[in-house]
Amino acid sequence: MNGFEKRREQKKESIRCSAEQLFMKHGFRETSIAEIAAKAGVSQVTIYKYYGSKEKLQHHVIEHYMAEQLQGFIDVVESNRPFWDKLNYFFSQKADGFTTMHMEFIDKFISSDPEMAILM
């Protein structure tokens, strides 16, 4: 990967991380592209260039979040931890996930994208 591609991927990741934090905290409707751009240190045009729309950015955020969660669960299942530790981990993760994620964000996404509703 050359320097240009590396900077491009870093910008995309910064946008995605910033959007995830803001969506989780404030919800989709209450988060503006301007807020995401400011937090990521990029212009609003850059967000549209890489993601096309706020809705597509939201889709990427959810996909990434779900992939991270799934990998975390796989890591625990495949670990050498005792069964009860694994079970306690899963229950605590489920509770933590719903307290850190703004419910409007989940609701908006599930109701607007049946494919993501199945994934979640």
Image: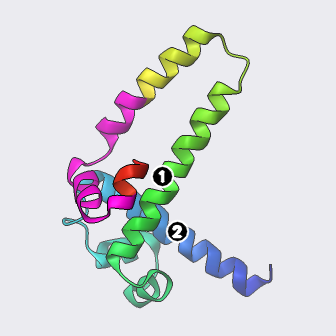
Give the image location of residue 79, x and y in percent: 71, 24
Q: Which residue is mark 2?
A: 14
Where residue 113 sits, quadrant-wise, is: bottom left
The boundaries of the magenta stretch are 94-115
| Residue 55 is covered by the magenta coloring | no
Where residue 71 sits, quadrant-wise, is: top right
Q: Tag on residue 91? A: none
Quarter of the picture containing the N terminus is bottom right
Q: Amino acid at mark 2?
A: Ser
Residue at screen point 33% across, 76% down: 54
Q: Is 75 located above or below residue 101 in the figure?
A: above
Q: Is 98 located above or below residue 49 in the figure?
A: above
Q: Residues within 10 Å of mark 1 (few under 14, many from 20)?
A: some
Spatial separation of the CA atoms under disc 1 and disc 2: 14 Å
- In front here: 119 or 71? 119
**SS class of the residue under badge 1?**
helix
Give the image location of residue 50, x and y in percent: 50, 83
- In front here: 104 or 46? 104
**SS class of the residue under badge 2?**
helix
Query: How is the protein colored in the picture?
Result: rainbow
Q: Which residue is mark 1?
A: 65
**SS majority, magenta:** helix
Indicate which label's residue lies in the foreground, 1 or 2: 1
- In front here: 35 or 115? 115
Q: Amino acid at mark 1?
A: Tyr
| Residue 102 is covered by the magenta coloring | yes
Q: Identify the residue at the far right of this view.
A: 1
Residue at screen point 25% across, 67% down: 31
Residue 47 appears left or right of 79: left
Give the image location of residue 56, x and y in percent: 39, 74
